[in-house]
Image (spheres, rainbow, N blue to C red):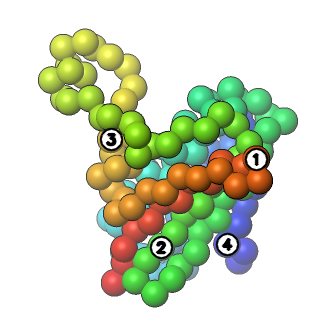
Amino acid sequence: MSNKVTIGCKKEELVKIRQFTSDMLEQHKVPDLQAHKLVLAVDEVCANLIIHSNNCNPESHIEFDIVFKTKQIVFTFRDKGVGFDINNYESPSMEELVSSRRQGGLGLMLVKRIMDKIEFSTEKNHNICRLIKMYP
């Protein structure tokens, strides 16, 4: 099984990313609870790239790959949409979310809690987002 998949930027493609991620994690024997968290984080980042970075434009594409290294799993997204560095995102407090009845904001907070490291860069007109999870 290849460790890479490319999707068009439409919400219906999220199921393909979730299944691909789940299959790869199962193939590498990642325990179910950990795998579910990782799929959730990948899904959230990919949804944000589709919706916010690429405006659900099916002509735009996201390349996604998973690399299993010694003691870590690296999830990499590449796209040409509007760049967004999750590390600069200030998660709202629970009190702010509840009092303002604000929609959104929880997903990126979850991603930051699930992943050990998040990297964002731009190379050759591509945005690159890497989610890194330390793994025994």
The disc, 1 or 2, on the residue closer to the chain's N-terminal end is 2
Left or right? Give the position of 136 relative to 62: left
* Tag 4: amino acid: Asn
The disc, 2 or 3, on the residue closer to the chain's N-terminal end is 2
How far, Cα to Cα, is label 1 from label 2?
Answer: 25 Å
Q: Nearer the viewer, residue 118 or 51?
A: 118
Q: Secondary structure at mark 4?
A: loop
The residue labelled by disc 4 is 3
Quadrant position of residue 123: bottom right
How many other residues sit within 10 Å of disc 1, few (<14), some (14-19) or many (≥20)?
few
Find residue 109 and name its label.
3
Q: Secondary structure at mark 3?
A: helix
Is residue 36 visible to us here?
Answer: no
The image shows residue 71 at horizontal and vertical percentages of 40, 83
How far, Cα to Cα, is label 2 from label 4?
Answer: 12 Å
The residue labelled by disc 1 is 125
Q: Say if 38 sits above or below 8 in the image.
A: below
How many other residues sit within 10 Å of disc 2, few (<14), some (14-19) or many (≥20)?
some
How many other residues sit within 10 Å of disc 4, few (<14), some (14-19) or many (≥20)?
few
Residue occupying the far right of the picture: 59
Find residue 73 and name its label.
2
Numbered disc in front, either 2 or 4: 2
